[in-house]
Every structure is written in structure tokens, then in C-alpha cells.
Image: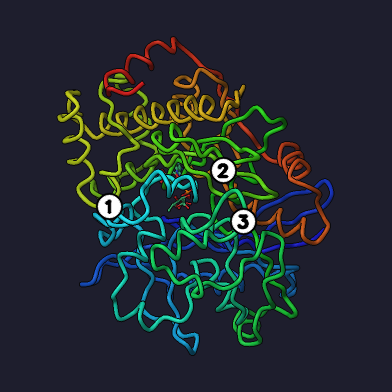
Amino acid sequence: MRSYAAVDLGASSGRVMVGRVGPDLLELSEAHRFPNRPVRVPEGLRWDILGLYAGVLEGLRAAGAGRGGRLDSVGIDSWAVDYGLLDADGALLGNPVHYRDARTEGVAEKVWATVPAAELYAHTGLQYAPFNTLYQLTAAQGSAQLAHAKHLLLVPDLLAYWLTGEQGTELTNASTTQLIDPRTREWSYDVAARLGVDLGLFAPLRRPGDPAGLLRQEVLEETGLSGPVPVTAVGSHDTASAVAAVPATGERFAYICTGTWSLAGLELDAPVLTEESRAANFTNELGLDGTVRYLRNIMGLWLLQECVRAWGDPDLGELLREAAEAAPLRSVVDAGDAAFLAPGRMPERIAEACRAAGEPVPRTRAETTRCILDSLALAHRRAVEEAQRLADHPVDVVHIVGGGTRNALLCQLTADACGLPVVAGPTEAAALGNVLVQGRAHGVVGDLADMRGLLARTQPLTRYEPRGDPAVWRAAQARLGTR
Ligand code: ADP
Ligand code: LRH
């Protein structure tokens, strides 16, 4: 039996979890959880990276306490695409820019003037999202900060660098930069050269399971851990770790990682780079062991988080109970619409979207909440259906993992909308995937199928059978003008 610390930073909270792993054992406990609150400064929206690092250190201290300061390894995953720039001395140049910052507005069009969108998709397989690292770097071109930068580290790699002093670029997260070719799983040198992106900024690629250094002496002293403690590269994109922890027992499954985002799609063994796939805005991100995460980004519980914030933080449980009583499918919006990306005024923006789509405007908080959950279920349905068709990969079951598994109404509505059984759990999927990859690197668990078998045997899962008539959902989809 081994103990691994998983640092898992989501857009709404960071946590350090401890996983105990053995041949027939997988237990996860929370050592420390801390809020992730971005900060708006005059230049724009920034991550509080020092606050997050402080949370990681405190979490590692808590993880070691009670086990004599002993941990077998540490793994780090976080949200994708964002990065810190370092100068020639290795010092961070400013706070990493938040992917919801407005600096990328209109940038994609400039990129496509040099590399047309269709060609970009054929080479990188990435969906259009304004925040893909490529667009962020293009927006930053000409800035003093980029001019001074000698290194670029994606957020989990930056934290690993601070913990170990070693730099690397973990592949699953690198695949969200739009600078990786999903066919070769290497840098897309041609795209980078044509767009003036200096790949020399990036540290060498490393893959999940690779060693990523040892905790520095100062870190050991600050956390009370007894060294040596290795850091192991995991699927450092939180979605890669979460998909690794989908407790599927066969191949005919779809997954939805629900948290701040809903990431809905399939695990494939090769990318789908067709024009139809691009038009449907499906992405091909890289997963463990040569797999591809073929999925679509849906705005997710961000819509609800932002409403709850605007309403002054009412009790979520009560809000969801009221939403369960509200009239079903009264109003729906396109929960995939990037118009919902920026923070602020979310109840008003949802009302505006309803008005624009000719839908009744929600009159109460319960109705707005119901509108969000119905709209998410509808977007889940559409993504699951389209992914199956575009990848020619039929499924019998939908797995939901992540924070949204705690929302029984969302899970049930998703089962109803998809017309398929939903298996919900684990809630802390990203942390479990993180821990399991460390365990695998140290020979405690076997391949991806073994990892999933262990999850299915040990983790509490809830099954939701589809109810009602799927035609109701098709009709609601038609109201939005999409199939
Ligand atoms: P991220 O990793 O993106 O920060 P999480 O996976 O932690 O997100 O999921 C956060 C979401 O989980 C919240 O926005 C909230 O909607 C949902 N959630 C958390 N706790 C509960 C709960 N007790 N009941 C219902 N939903 C919950
Ligand atoms: C989820 C996530 C998602 C990305 C987004 C930026 O946390 O990593 O997979 O698209 O954040």
C-alpha cells in the first residue's frame, strides 16, 4: 500500500487529496481544500497563483501530517491552457492571465488569416475556443512581458517547477495549447513557425508517469515532509486525469466531466479531424496511453456558480430542491454558447439569451436554475449524440464524473435527455486519476483498464435510468434551432 498526494486545481477550488493505493485498495481523503478566486486588476483578470501555491504547500503539509511526513509521490493537475512566463533567471513575469480574460477577443480571426481555421484543425485537432494558448500567445505578441520571457510553463508545470526546480511540459495539457499535432503527439512545428510562436519557450515534453523531480529541500522544510519525495507527471490537464478515472468497464461509453465546465465526449484511439467534426466544434485532446479525448466544451455549472454569486450565495441544496419542483423545459438556452464565457451579470444574461431565442424568460431563481440544468442536459445530449455519429463510436452508457455528480437533478435530467443510463461518480475523479497514474508509475496498479476496474470495484457510484419520452428533448432542441 502506498500514499500519493494529488494536487488538483479546478477553476472554482483547489484541493490536495491523499490517495492510498494497493492491488485491491483505492481510498481518497481530502487533506486541504481552498477557494480559487481570480482577481481583476487594471490590466485584466488574473489567477492568484501565489495564493494557489500557498494552498498547495499547506495541503502537502496536511497530507504528510499523521503519516510521519511520508508521501510516496506527489502529482499535480489543473485547468488547461493557461501559463506563466519566466525570465532568464527563472523568475515569474507577472500573474498568469485567466482564460476568461477579454484579451483574446477577435484574435482568432487574425490567426486564421495566416493559417485558415480548417488547416489549423487538420493540424492540431483543437476546437475553436478563444482561450486556446495559441490565441493567448498571439494576443500577447508585442507585449513587454512576452518580449522578456525565456520560458513558458503551463500552470501545473509552473507549480511543479516551484516545488522541484525542474521544468517540463506535460503532454496532455500541452495538447490544449493548439500547438500539438494529435497524430504524432509532438509539437506542430509548422503551425508554430507560420504563426511566429517560439516553441523554444516550452520545456521538453514529458508524459504521464514520467519522473518530474524531487521536492526541493526548502519545500520539505516548509511542509514537514521527509525526503526524498518525488513528483510524478500525471495527466496534468484536470480533464485528462478525470477521464482516466471514468469507471467504465467496456469501450461503449461516453463521459461527461462536470464541474465549472461540462466536457462531454468519447475516448478514442485516434483523432477525428474531419471538416464535419470541426464544424461541430469537437476537440481532440490527448489522454493517457495514446488515447484521444474527443469532446465538446459546454459552459457547465459555471452558469449556476455565477448566478449563485450574483444572488448573494443562497443555499445551493435549497435552490436545487426548488428547481426540481419547477416546470420542466419551460425555457432553454444554448449552454455551449461562448457568450457565457465572461464573468458577471449571469441571471440577466440568461434572461437576455431566453428573450433572443424566443423562450419564456425565467421569473424566479428556481426557474433560472431549472433553465440552466435543463439547458445543460440538452447540451449533454447533443454532444453525446454528435460525438457518437462523428466518431462512428456507439455507446450504451454515459458516465458522469466530477462535482456535478453531487447534483442528482442534473444527473437524472442528463439520463432522460440522452435516453441512456447514467452512472455518476466518482466526484473527485481528477484527483483519483492523478493518484492512479502515480500508482501505475510505481508499479502498484496496471494499465488503464486495470485502473478503471479498481475504480469500479472500490468507488461509490449511482445509476440513473432514463425516464420519460426522449421526443420531449428533441422538441426542446428544435426550439433552439439545433438538432
Ligand atoms: P472545478 O473542479 O471545476 O472547480 P468541481 O468539480 O469542484 O469544479 O465542481 C464544482 C461544482 O459542483 C459547483 O459549481 C457546484 O455546482 C457542484 N456542487 C458542489 N457541491 C455540491 C452539492 N453539495 N450539491 C450540488 N452540487 C454541488
Ligand atoms: C476544466 C478545463 C477544461 C478546459 C478549461 C479551460 O477545468 O481544464 O478541460 O477546456 O478548463
How far across and how far down the image is residue 393, in percent? 60, 27
Q: Disc 2 designates what residue?
A: 293
Please name the amino acid that badge 1 sits on: Glu
Q: Nearer the viewer, mark 3 or mark 1?
A: 1
Query: Which of the numbered marks, if any, corresponds to residue 235?
Result: 3
**Mark 1 vs ligand 2: CB below 8 Å:** no
Please name the amino acid that badge 2 sits on: Arg
Q: CA distance from mark 2 to mark 3?
A: 12 Å
Q: Nearer the viewer, mark 1 or mark 2?
A: 1
**Relative to 470, does residue 342 appear above or below in the rendering?**
below
**Relative to 460, does residue 190 appear above or below in the rendering?**
below
**Relative to 364, does residue 15 appear above or below in the rendering?**
below
**Mark 3 vs ligand 2: CB below 8 Å:** no
Q: Using residue 179 as the reference point, say whether residue 343 is left or right of it.
A: left
Provide the secondary structure element on which disc 3 rests: loop
Provide the secondary structure element on which disc 2 rests: strand
- Residue 55 or residue 395, whichever sits in front: 395
| Disc 1 + disc 2, Cβ < 8 Å | no
Q: Earlier in the sequence, mark 2 or mark 3?
A: 3
Disc 3 residue crowd, few under 14, some 14–19, many 20+, Cα 10 Å: many
Measuring 45% from the left and 38% from the top, which residue is drawn there?
282
**Relative to 20, does residue 25 appear above or below in the rendering?**
above
- Residue 3 or residue 475, whichever sits in front: 475
Q: Nearer the viewer, mark 2 or mark 3?
A: 2
Query: Which of the numbered marks, if any, corresponds to residue 109?
Result: 1
Disc 1 residue crowd, few under 14, some 14–19, many 20+, Cα 10 Å: few
Q: CA distance from mark 1 to mark 2?
A: 26 Å
Measuring 18% from the left and 34% from the top, which residue is drawn there?
351
